Image (tube, rainbow, N blue to C red):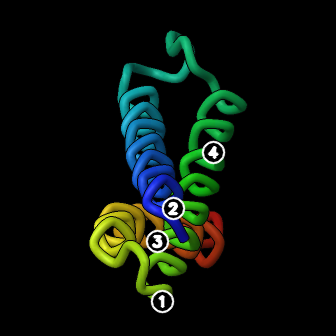
Amino acid sequence: MTKWMAMLAILFALAGWVLMGMTGYHLLSGDFANRTCQTGCVKTLFWSALALAVLGLAAGLAGVVKRESRVFGGLALLLAAPLAGIAGGIIVIGTTQGPV
């Protein structure tokens, strides 16, 4: 992995954080009827953030395993791993909690 690939992994992770922040913003932007971003929009933002986190994680792991860009690969892991953990936690909690 070259340094540009590790930088791309960092950009993937940062873009994933931006999308996750936008997801939270739109979920908390008012009552459901008055929101500009409805269910389909929020789902697209969430799954896009998760996909970017997984891409950043994979490229970061490749950077750490190969010795060409360990610093940037490690930074990509530090940015992407918490995002993937948050998204994974949301998925697990959402699928294990039945209707109340």
On the image, the x and y values in percent for residue 80 come to 41, 64
Residue neighbourhood size for the residue with mark 2, other residues' Cα within 10 Å, grouped as few (<14), some (14–19), many (≥20): many
First in sequence: mark 1 or mark 4?
A: 4
Amino acid bearing label 1? Val
In the picture of the structure, the residue carrying the numbered disc 3 is 60
Mark 2 and mark 4: Cα distance apart in space: 12 Å
Query: Alpha-carbon distance for marks 4 and 3?
Result: 18 Å
How far apart are labels 3 and 2 at the CA level? 6 Å
Badge 2 element = helix
In the displayed structure image, the side of residue 83 where residue 95 appears, left or right: right
Residue at 42% x, 31% y: name it. Answer: 22
Residue 57 position within the rendered picture, expressed as x and y whole percent measured from the top left? 50, 70
Front: mark 4 or 3:
3
Distance between mark 3 and mark 1 Cα atoms: 9 Å
Query: Quarter-wise, where is residue 77 in the image?
Result: bottom left
N-terminal of the pair, mark 2 or mark 4, is: 4
Q: Distance from label 1 to label 4 (Cα)? A: 26 Å
Task: Using the image, tell me which numbered label, if any, was put on residue 65.
Answer: 1
Q: Residue at x 72, y 31 (%)?
A: 40
Q: Which mark is residue 48?
A: 4
Q: Do callouts 4 and 3 mark residues in contact (Cβ within 8 Å)?
A: no
Disc 1 crowd rating (10 Å Cα; few below 14, some 14-19, many 20+) is some
Q: Quadrant of the C terminus?
A: bottom right
Q: Amino acid at mark 2?
A: Gly
Instruction: Tell me which residue sits at (44%, 21%) in the image.
Output: 31
Establish if 62 lies above or below 53: below
Where residue 15 appears, x then y in whole percent? 45, 41
Identity of the residue drawn at 44% across and 43% down:
20
- Location of residue 66 with respect to 91 vertically, above or below: below
Question: Where is mark 2, residue-wise?
Answer: 56
